Image (spheres, helix red, strand yellow):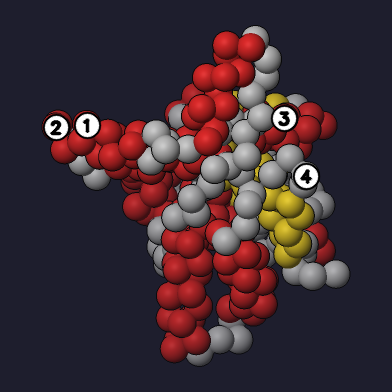
Amino acid sequence: MSLSTLTITPDGIAILQLNRPEAKNAISVALLDSIWHQLKEIGSSAARVVVVKGSGDSFSAGADLKERITMSPDAVKQFLNDIRDCFLELENLPQPTIACINGFAFGGGLELALSCDIRYAGESSVVGLTETKLGIIPGAGGTQRLTKLLGKSIALEWIARAKKIGASEGLAKGLYQEVFSDSELETSCLAIALDIAESAPVAVRAAKKAVNGALSYGGRSALDWERLCYAETLPTKDRLEALLAFKEKRKPKFIGE
């Protein structure tokens, strides 16, 4: 079995699954290479939304420490460069991305989830950026993304304490959009992904660009950025289809053009 698999459903949902259940999907060099390959395939595909999930009972326990202990300092630096760039590739996908977090997501596993646009978790999930208890800090963007998402105080406390976060606290603090029962997590994530996939693809990608711009621009510049993103939808066939469907009182059939 491949260390990660990619399935694109007829509805346009790309499902990227980590497949090292025996190691709780710990991120080895080989698994990282596999994820990166799948991300490049997604980026050039017609997928409308992406769901990232782990196999077995965990999302990802983080870096493969058994492998890490055998690596030279130079090899560790190279791995950090690669995992940072891989997660940046995930963050920069044009499609909305959803992390479907079951079980554990520690260290690099949580950093992977933080690289997604939206996160949902199972009720028994436990996550954390636990690197300080290993004598290091998060090195794949975790310090930056968690701070932007939850603010300085929460991020620093969680990281400095290597705190392990249960589902209810993660939901209360804003790490997750919603928490589902473990048995319903995957079905719920796919239902949400389908809801996104049924929207006009060009519009959804433009919306992601516009929302991301809100983190970089302010004032009139932010509104100008939104207007530029809006302009991408104006010449599309899907916009005209939506208007026609409204007139005819039917569901629109979007083609992504």
Picture layout, residue 105 above or below residue 74: above
Amino acid at dot 2: Arg
Instruction: Measure the C-alpha gap from mark 2 to mark 3.
Output: 36 Å
Instruction: Identify the residue under disc 1.
Output: 223
> Could you tell me which secondary element the residue under label 4 belongs to?
loop
Kindly identify the residue that appears in the image at 60 percent across and 86 percent down: 70
In the rendered image, residue 69, in percent from the top left (x then y), is placed at: 59, 81
Picture layout, residue 40 above or below residue 67: above
Instruction: Identify the residue under disc 3.
Output: 191
> Could you tell me which secondary element the residue under label 1 belongs to?
helix
Instruction: Give yes or no for contact between labels 2 and 1 (Cβ–Cβ under 8 Å).
Output: yes
For this orientation, the residue located farthest to the left is 220
Residue 10's label in the rendered image is 4
In the rendered image, residue 237, in percent from the top left (x then y), is placed at: 53, 36
Total residue callouts: 4
Instruction: Identify the residue under disc 2.
Output: 220
Residue 244's label in the rendered image is none
> Could you tell me which secondary element the residue under label 3 belongs to?
helix
Instruction: Measure the C-alpha gap from mark 4 to mark 1.
Output: 35 Å
Q: Nearer the viewer, residue 243 or 151?
A: 243
